[in-house]
Amino acid sequence: MSDLAIQVNSVHKSYRMGRSDLHVLRGLSLSVAKGEFASIVGASGSGKSTLLHIIGLLDRTDRGEVILDGVKARNLSAGQRNRIRCNDVGFVFQFYHLLGELSVLENVLLPAKVNTPALSWPDRRKEARDHAKELIGRLGLADRMKHRPGELSGGERQRVAIARALANQPKILLADEPTGNLDSKSGRSIMEVLKAYHSDYGQTVLMVTHDMSLAEGTDRVLHLTDGRLGK
Amino acid sequence: MYKLFLCFRYLRSRVIAYFAMLAVALCVAMMLIVISVMNGFLDKIENAAKGLYGDIVVASNLRGIGRYDEFIEELTEQVPQVEAASPFIFAYGLLSIPGQDYRQILQVAGIRLPERAKVTDFEDGLFTQRGLSEPTFDPPVSLLRQRLEEHNRQLQDIYRRESSLSEKDGPLAPEKQYFLTRLDRAWLLQIEAEGFLLSAQPHQQKLAHLQRELATAEADAKGQYSQQAVVLAEQLDELIEQAKYQPPDKRAILGLGIPGLIIRTEKGETVRYIVPGHQVVLSIMPLGRSLSSTDIPTSVTRLTVVDDCRTDVSSIDSGICYVPFETLQSLNNMDAEYSADDPDRQITPPRCSQIHIKVRDADSHGERLLEVNRMVQSLWQDFLQRYPDAVAPGVDVTIETWRQMQAKVIGPIQQQRTLVVIMFGIISLVSVVLIFVIFYTIVVQKTRDVGVLKAIGASSAGVAQIFLAWGAAVGLVGSILGCIGGYYFVKYINPIQDTMDRWFGFRVWSREWFLFEKIPNTVDPTTAVNIMIAAVLAGLAGAAIPAIRAARMQPVEALRYE
């Protein structure tokens, strides 16, 4: 079994922009060890989010290889990719992406519902709810369970998004500018939450940010420039 | 699990989906109303045709079918599927009322009672003898008086209601005044009929007895002079004059709705001018025998009305008068004809226009009835070889099921129904388009949700199922609401029309123009279920393309969507 949670080997990714191609990742390679909290820093448009999406199996490479916990992404079927996204990878987005029709508790329960067949849900329901409530409580939102995302502040929404990302206890947590849409106080609070979970559960965390001060608090900082990584 | 959960959550929180449901509900209600009314219309026509003709009809032209009793006997013995059969005469006549300037041309039907009740549902539509399984042309006068009293009470109730409404509204409108005057006239005629019945009651049995004796004497005389018959005829005439009531062979059952003989209230109630006890005069143009000259002498007879009958098809009820079979046979020159030289030699047997046959457990739409029809045809061919005088030379006899006989009436209505259903089906496609537009809009609005769902592991099929289930739910809820609405609209369609008429003076269904007294108001459960299934499929069809679009969305593109 590999000690690496994430391996990215010579990945290329470009987007069609009108008549020309925008080459975002140019043979990028990266390794993140299991239990490591790494951060990638780069300017806006440098391809940080693209890299994270490729690692999180939300997008595909043009060339190169992504290996998650020893499993090559290229060989995976659509169903296997879905299962990995559901069970092994948790995503925290810059703009939270909570479902507006659902309450805090329902948003956090959603990954468990996606992961459970309809007939098994009655057996699984209590355990999933208890786990979701515990997560929400630890994030300081116990009194906001029934609130809708629209009734929460930005920092609170991001906490809910983190709770949702952690709902299925993933091995890898990918955070895309988790504080990018928050004021500095809320941003620090979110970073503390991520660090606390990393230290408590030993999860692999890969965060991208353009804020160097936040990145410095992580185990390793990588710089993304011109589609390649440097220390 | 998440699919159903999100489907119901979106259903509850998206107001726009309620508009899709409303569109489906309106379309379902519209289809249900249209199909129910059209089917009801067709059912009424079919039931009326069956009620008039039975299941199979043996028919001839004006010259008629002889030896019908022998044929009916063979039919019931040799074709076990035949339950009963009865001869029938159709003729045309002029109805007039003694002492009144009234004339009406109508069809005259000669029927045998109570035999006819075994072949058709004739007894169901009777006024005086309603509920009696064996109706007759000689019902007890006491029963006639009882029904007359009931009719009188109804008349008084209507009068009180109409006159009190008029008082509230201030001065009487000319048409209201005219209506009350007509009610007055109906009431006076009622009193007159009650008087006739009162004088007839003690003589009813003697009238029947004398008539039977006279018939026997005349039969014995075989068209020759008979002193006994003359004496009996004189005695009978005296008794008729005294009783103001005709003997049983001179009775009539009028169709309910003959113009000028009834009044219809705005509520659809029927008030009769001519009621049991009144006398009418019937003039028949006798066409049942070949004529050597163009001068056709008219047969005139006076009849006492003993009942009225409705099939609920006003085109039938408003132009028919039922009289005893043998009476019309005689009036229409369809009775036996004897040689002038030899009174014992019958030249022509007594004849009828049609023979109506009732088939056991007849499946009106199936092969079974056609099979029995073929058996009747075969028996008739055989019968004709044995009794060549059963029809005059050159006279055609047709043997058809009631459906074949009424094909020219039923066929166009069926085509009309199909056309209307297609037209309204096309209109209902609007709801599919509406669902499509609404769902497409929703999917566009929910693009980021789709991205999030895929990011947390939802499959493309799962995402599509959310929107398909949503579409099916919109179809199902809309169709349930539409079915309930359509059902109650159809059920109360007549009161709704009456209310519209009262409030806005707007009447879609005029009793004067259409065939029926009332708009058909029954909903067939199978039709309702079929429409509901179609609505759910429409919901699925409308949601299919948006659902496929959502399923095909790449998670990254969906998350980046603005």
Image (cartoon, helix red, strand yellow):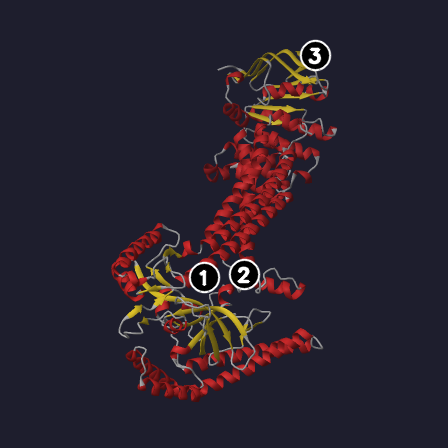
- Is B478 situated above or below A194? below
Residue B318 percent across, percent down from the top left = 51, 68
Question: At 55% from the left edge and 76% from the top edge, which residue is drawn?
Answer: B102
Q: Nearer the viewer, residue B375 or A153?
A: B375
**Residue B267 falls in which quadrant of the image?**
bottom right
Q: Earlier in the sequence, mark 2 or mark 1?
A: 1
Give B102 or B469, whichever is nearer the viewer. B102
Which label was assigned to residue B519?
2
Find the distance from the CA under tag 2 to the CA under tag 3: 80 Å
The subunit carrying tag 3 is A
Residue under label 1: B48
In the drawing, what numbered circle is on residue A22? Answer: none
Q: Chain of mark 2?
A: B
Question: Looking at the rendering, in which quadrant would you find the C terminus of chain B?
Answer: top right
Residue of label 3 = A226
- Compared with A188, B148 (above or below) is below
Q: Please, what secondary structure does the residue beneath circle 1 have?
A: helix
B290 relative to B365, above or below? below
Q: Amino acid at mark 3?
A: Asp
Q: Is residue B524 visible?
A: no
Decide if residue B389 is on the left or right side of residue A137: left
Residue at (57, 51) in percent of width and height: B30
Element type at mark 2: loop
Q: Residue B466: percent from the left, percent from the top?
A: 55, 36
Q: Are marks 2 and 3 in contact (CB under 8 Å)?
A: no
Name the image quarter holding residue B297: bottom left
In this rendering, does residue B552 appear at all? yes
Callout 1: 10 Å neighbours few (<14), some, many (20+)?
many
